[in-house]
Image (spheres, grey):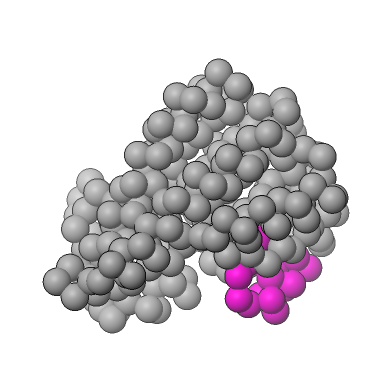
Amino acid sequence: MYSSLKGKTALITGGSRGIGRAIGIRLSQYGVNIIINYVRQRRDAEATMAAIEKNGVSCLVVKANVARQDNVERMFAEIQEQYDTLDILVSNAASGVLKPAMELTQRHWDWSMDINARAMLTITQHAVPMMKDGGTVLAVSSLGAVRALPNYTVVGASKAALESLVRHLAIELGPMGITVNTVSAGVVDTDALKKFPNRDEMISVSLAKTPLGRLTTPDDVADLALFLCSDAASMIHGQVVVVDGGYAIAG
């Protein structure tokens, strides 16, 4: 089912930890060469690279803040020194400010929008010229794009913008043989979740309201990403595909 992935190359932003790391490792298990983008934790990026290279593929680690145009340009210049083509782009890097709406400033808004939504547009604009034989673009979102969560105002708005961008990119890039989709995850207990002041409550509520009885894991998200990158998903386009154990329908 996934044999066509062997020898392809994928760029994963925010790929050193959590969901990004899991996607990189999963794709590498099926022969995909991986480019890991990170912005702060070099040690985590190198540990992820080591895990990926154990699967017999190449891995390049590139430091860049994808919210900054100059960083993206430098990152792609470095990528093009090693790879002529790019087949898969996973826009996973994310950040944001967790505050009530009445406490948000313009800086909070701009930061969250830039890293969670605009960055995908910028990296896609640079990636598409390298997708010479078509390709796959994936955005990683969350249920906060369509649900109101405490302190999630600006992050949720930026994720909603990200999902809208995916639909517009799907219209433009489809004729080029490039599929574009969103992977939307339920509550995943990663380092990012530790920043939520109500983390313990979120986990307990999610467990109680998830029909399958457990939290979504990074590996669950990686399995969905693997499928969407494969030929088996060639007619899934412009969609938001949810992996949450049924939480969204029950919560």
Residue 142 visible in the snapshot: no
Q: Please say if 125 is above or below 45.
A: above
Left or right of 7, for residue 213: left
Q: Please say if 98 is above or below 146.
A: below
Quadrant containing the N terminus is top right
Residue 37 located within the stretch drawn in magenta: yes
Identity of the residue drawn at 81% across and 61% down: 54
Identity of the residue drawn at 40% across and 39% down: 165
Point out the stretch of residues depicted in magenta.
36-51
Q: Quadrant of residue 151?
A: bottom left
Q: Quadrant of residue 195?
A: bottom left
Identity of the residue drawn at 71% across and 36% down: 130
Residue 46 visible in the snapshot: yes
Q: Residue furthest top?
A: 175
Q: Please say if 103 is above or below 119.
A: below
Q: Residue furthest left?
A: 102
